[in-house]
Image: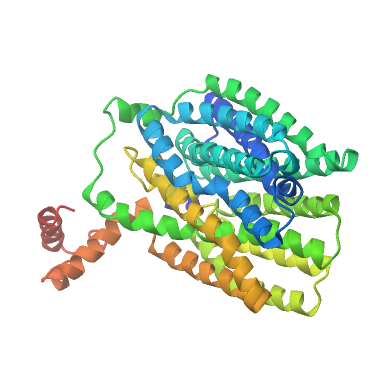
Amino acid sequence: MLSVNDAHQSTFESIPLSKDEKKAVAIVLTGNFLEYFDLMLFSHLAFVVTPYFMPKTDPVVAKMLAIFAFSSSFVIRPFAAYFWGYIGDNFGRVVVLTYTTLIMAVSCILIANIPPFVEWGYYATLLIIGCRILQGFSSAGEAKGAEIFVAEVVPHFPKIFLASAMVPITCDLGGLMATLLGSLCLSIDPVDGWRTCFYIGAAIAFSSSISRRKLKETKEFLDHIKGLKPKPKIWERYFERRNFFSLMGLNMICPTAFYFAYSYGSDLLKNKAGLEANLILFSNSLLLLIEIFFLWGCARLAYRYNPFHILKVRTVSSFILIPCCFGLLWVSPTHATIFLAQLVVLLSTASFDPATPIVIRSFGIQSRFSRYSKAWAFAKAFMYLSTGYLTYWLDSLFGMWGVLGLLMMFSSIFLVSLYAFVPQDKMLSTYIAIQKKKAIDFEDIGDLEDPSQTYSQKQHLRKWMKDHHV
């Protein structure tokens, strides 16, 4: 298997994927597309769907319940991460990927058949929140299961960067299809057209669940189950906790960016620019389309440049571009300036692709699914639950400048976490550097890679490494 550094020294011509690898990746990506089509139906149609299930008498209560309905699918994710993490680490990735799509299909059927608030009152509100929780439970396993499966089934760099980037790209394609279908159905039937969308979503989720039964487990996972994988080295165990918390920090900005772009931004397009519902959906679909090409471009850049360097450039640029866009938004809140602000926030801060496969492989196979999904789930649950309320509160007190401050704060957390995370190919050298600083005689310890080191100096270093369990 090639290292990350080898990938950056190679040309665009790399080891081609085998027929089985292509088939496995295609099945997972197709299912991921269909899963996120279902999940994003509610997210993009929230401003149309939620009023059917919310009280009309108290606007504040209705707003709070609407925010919770949007966020409720993320509240369950920490609990789901424990469940799916245990299943994924002990029974396999394919089991997770198969049953998550089945659960998503059931939730879509239920949403399409819940009576409105005027008929069932708060029972309708509780039911729609329950369905969103069910969707969150499903997507918690699907989202990370697809990323881990692709990172393991593609064994070599740099092809893995493009294959891994296809996971969020298919997520965006699913969201794009959801917005386009939602816009079409609402144009045909403005009252109940959204129900048709969920019926279609349920049908395609069932078909996805059936196709995923043909998947085979990854070789890396099977070797682990058979006891063929070596135990993690001491330096790999040393960075497990640090990387776990760094990964939580990397996941914190995405909910804020997503909420700003698709919820807060949709409200601005409706209230400031005066756009109708179908035009807002069409505008959001353009955002998704641009993001898809952007993610593909970042994956291709990763063939030549270190993915972590790409992320650092993107994040640092956000500290300049986002305030500039908010300045334009303050001067002239038109459709063009709102769209530009949505786009810049999404592209500069919304994910840590194309470094995802490097992040995944930095966790040991024995607990990879659990650790990776828990870090994602805890960060996303906290952020999606709090972002809506924080945005509403800051916007009420400080206007859009409060929202800008929130985005800048979490961009800073993302950047710090990016520098704190230690990839697998950097663990040994970083561990040696840390231990050398702790050693009394660290001045006398050389570097095995340094050609100027004498034989006796290298022998001294080898003895020191043995004494310190390196």
Residue 307 image point, x, y percent: 51, 56
343 vs 361: above or below: below
Residue drawn at (52%, 27%) of the image: 99
Residue drawn at (85%, 53%) of the image: 279
236 vs 188: above or below: below
Residue drawn at (75%, 78%) of the image: 330
Residue drawn at (25%, 65%) of the image: 433
Q: How is the image coloured?
A: rainbow
Residue toward you, 153 or 61: 61
Residue 407 image point, x, y percent: 58, 69
Total labels drawn: 0
Residue 445: image quadrant is bottom left
343 vs 233: above or below: below
Residue 183 image point, x, y percent: 82, 44
Residue toward you, 261 or 466: 261
Whether residue 219 is visible: yes
Q: Is residue 371 left or right of residue 110?
A: left
Residue toward you, 69 or 253: 69
Whether residue 306 is visible: no
302 vs 325: above or below: above
Residue at the extreme right: 188
Residue 124 image point, x, y percent: 66, 40
Q: Is residue 367 left or right of residue 258?
A: left
Q: Quadrant of the N terminus?
A: top left
Residue 23: image quadrant is top right
